[in-house]
Amino acid sequence: MIKMKTVRKKMLARDLKGLIDLPDYDDAQPVEVAVTPEEQTELSAEELKKVVKSLVGAIPYTDKTLDELRMERLEKRYAIAD
């Protein structure tokens, strides 16, 4: 595996428009961009099975809408009633 280093480059905000969603930066605002390699770990088949098994059934199927589920959760957590 090749070890990659972080690369930094100073540029102007206008150079990044269209590539990265920047907050309300002025086009002439100096910015610094850092590119860092993402560390990836591969799960073994057994580890992957454990992860999937822990997720199955975690969210029971229901015909309720997301709003209904949210309100139910809020009622339980904060004792909110209509």
Image (cartoon, rainbow, N blue to C red):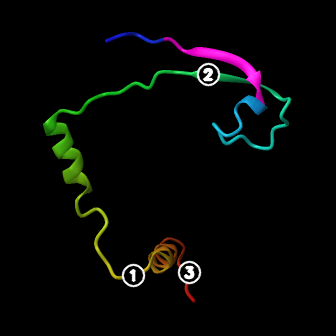
Name the image quarter holding the C terminus.
bottom right
Q: Residue furthest bottom?
A: 82
Above or below 76: residue 9: above
Judge the density around disc 1: few (<14), some (14-19), many (≥20) Cα neighbours within 10 Å.
few
Per the image, the residue denoted by label 3 is 80
- Tag 2 and tag 3, C-beta contact below 8 Å: no
Which residue position is annotated with label 1?
64
Tell me residue 51's x, y (percent).
Answer: 24, 46
Give whichever of 56, 35 is nearer the camera: 35
Left or right relative to 34: residue 16: right
> What predominant SS class does the magenta segment belong to?
strand
Q: In whole angstroms, how far apart are the C-alphas of marks 2 and 3? A: 46 Å
Q: Which residues are magenta?
A: 5-13
Q: Residues within 10 Å of mark 3 (few under 14, many from 20)?
A: few
Percent coordinates x, y for residue 4 in the rendering: 45, 12
x, y percentage for residue 14? Answer: 77, 32
Position of 76 with respect to 35 (left or right) is left
Q: Which residue is mark 2?
A: 34
Kind of residue sitting beneath label 1: Lys
The part of the image, by quadrant, that contains residue 81 is bottom right
Give the Cα separation between the discs numbered 3 and 1: 18 Å
Q: Secondary structure at mark 1?
A: loop
Asked if residue 23 is positioned above or below residue 43 in the image, the reply reads below
Q: Please determine whether, in this image, residue 81 is positioned above or below residue 24.
A: below
